[in-house]
Amino acid sequence: MFLPTEIFYEKEVENYSLGKELLERYKKKQVPCTLIQNHNAIEEMRKKQNKEFPRMKQNLIIGIRKTHRFVPNHKVSDFLVPYTSSGCIAMCLYCYLVCNYNKCAYLRLFVNREQMQRYFPNNTILYIV
């Protein structure tokens, strides 16, 4: 199981049961937890060089998804729904994230999933992993 080296979290996650659960779980495991203003603008992560990429991938960011936009997609479904997470913890050598998205390739979990569901079209089937 993934055990992050550090947690960065938005204050609002404490208002959601999943947010509380995650923070409690990792604090019990003595993972340092740092309060941030916005999961999209973590200043200490943005200042890091590309060589820090492997260390940044070991962090977990817990936030609130603020955008609930559905993008039409008629190739494989009706819509692309807003993701409940983004990023990846893998360290694949061929990963395009290293050069293109160094500042946001870390794993982010959004804890306001119930709020996101309210924006789904009526006939949407939801699979949360």
Image (cartoon, rainbow, N blue to C red):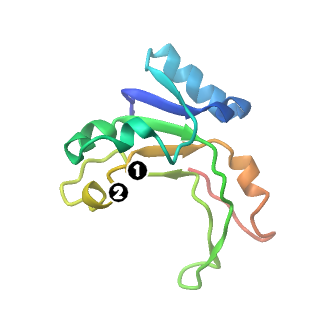
Q: Quadrant of residue 74?
A: bottom right
Say above or below: 12 vs 40: above
Q: Residue at x 67, y 66 (%)?
A: 69
Q: Please provide percent x and percent y for residue 54.
A: 25, 41
Say above or below: 43 vs 72: above
Q: Quadrant of the N terminus?
A: top left
Q: Are marks 1 and 2 in contact (CB under 8 Å)?
A: yes
Helix, strand or loop under label 2: loop
Mark 2 highlights which residue? Answer: 101
Mark 1 highlights which residue? Answer: 104
Say above or below: 78 vs 26: below
Q: Please provide percent x and percent y for residue 6.
A: 41, 27
Q: In the rendering, which numbered label is found on residue 120?
A: none
Q: Residue at x 54, y 80 (%)?
A: 76
Which amino acid does the dot numbered 1 rest on? Cys
Task: Tell me the crowding category of disc 1: few under 14, some 14 to 19, or many 20 or more residues within 10 angstroms, Cα based.
Answer: many
Q: Residue at x 65, y 34 (%)?
A: 13
Which amino acid does the dot numbered 2 rest on? Tyr
Q: Residue at x 74, y 56 (%)?
A: 117
- Report whether 49 appears left or right of 77: left
